[in-house]
Amino acid sequence: RKEVEQDPGPFNVPEGATVAFNCTYSNSASQSFFWYRQDCRKEPKLLMSVYSSGNEDGRFTAQLNRASQYISLLIRDSKLSDSATYLCAVKGDSWGKFQFGAGTQVVVTP
Amino acid sequence: GAVVSQHPSRVICKSGTSVKIECRSLDFQATTMFWYRQFPKQSLMLMATSNEGSKATYEQGVEKDKFLINHASLTLSTLTVTSAHPEDSSFYICSAHGLAGNSYEQYFGPGTRLTVT
């Protein structure tokens, strides 16, 4: 079993709609969680950290469910520019080693 | 956010040659740098972790004699792919972990696309 798993998608979303997807992790001792956005043939860019109480950044909401060992990302009012692959990252220890999921592809259509 | 550069951004080399990729943290000191490899439609796979002044720690299945890592300073790490073969063709991304501003985060370089012919 992979340490971090994501539904690869693609999630085809009409512009203006809401889309949500999860990322499960196997290491219950994981400490920190992040969502990255990766555009085609580019490096990942940090979208947001995921806090225990859940957090929101504009149209993006991230949540953590430690009991079920997953994090989620919700995108409201989707824009065409939101089309990308969203990678979740889980940090298991304090000195920065990340495990990445394979990514969830989101395609926002006009 | 903090800036991490990689050079070259794209390289094509012949089978059997060696290729060196540089990763620099431009505006902060990176206590740790990570090297990843990403094949098309797959996740980032951690290859090795390097700390300044010490030997790199390689992930299982990554050959340390093939992928030489040098972390000579707090702002520079290099990855050398020795005797490259077509199966080494991939997107290589470094990241630097350090204090930038008020937070410790991991910042990615723009990646190097290696094609071995």
Image (cartoon, coloured by chain):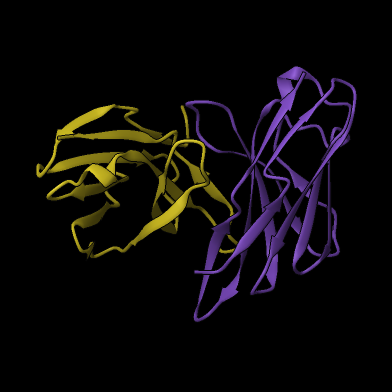
Chain colours: A yellow, B purple
Q: Is residue A91 above or below residue A17?
A: below
**In which quadrant of the rendered view does residue A50 lie?**
bottom left
| Apparent side of residue B82 relative to residue A17 in the rendered image (left or right) | right
Q: Residue furthest bottom?
A: B102
The residue located at (35%, 28%) in the rendering is: A8
Give the position of the C terminus of chain A as an image quadrant.
top left
The residue located at (53%, 26%) in the rendering is: B40
The residue located at (47%, 26%) in the rendering is: B41
Q: Is residue B40 above or below residue A31?
A: above
Q: Is residue B21 visible?
A: yes
Q: Position of residue B84 (x, y in %)?
A: 83, 26
Q: Position of residue B61 (x, y in %)?
A: 72, 29
Q: Position of residue B88 (x, y in %)?
A: 73, 25
| Apparent side of residue B73 relative to residue A25 in the rendered image (left or right) | right
Taking depth in this image into account, of B102 and A98 the one nearest to the observer is B102
Q: Is residue A33 visible?
A: no
Taking depth in this image into account, of A94 and A40 the one nearest to the observer is A40
**In which quadrant of the rendered view does residue A80 lie?**
top left
Q: Position of residue A38 (x, y in %)?
A: 43, 43
| Apparent side of residue B48 relative to residue B13 in the rendered image (left or right) | left
**In which quadrant of the rendered view does residue B90 lie?**
top right
Taking depth in this image into account, of B20 and B77 the one nearest to the observer is B20
Q: How many marks?
A: 0
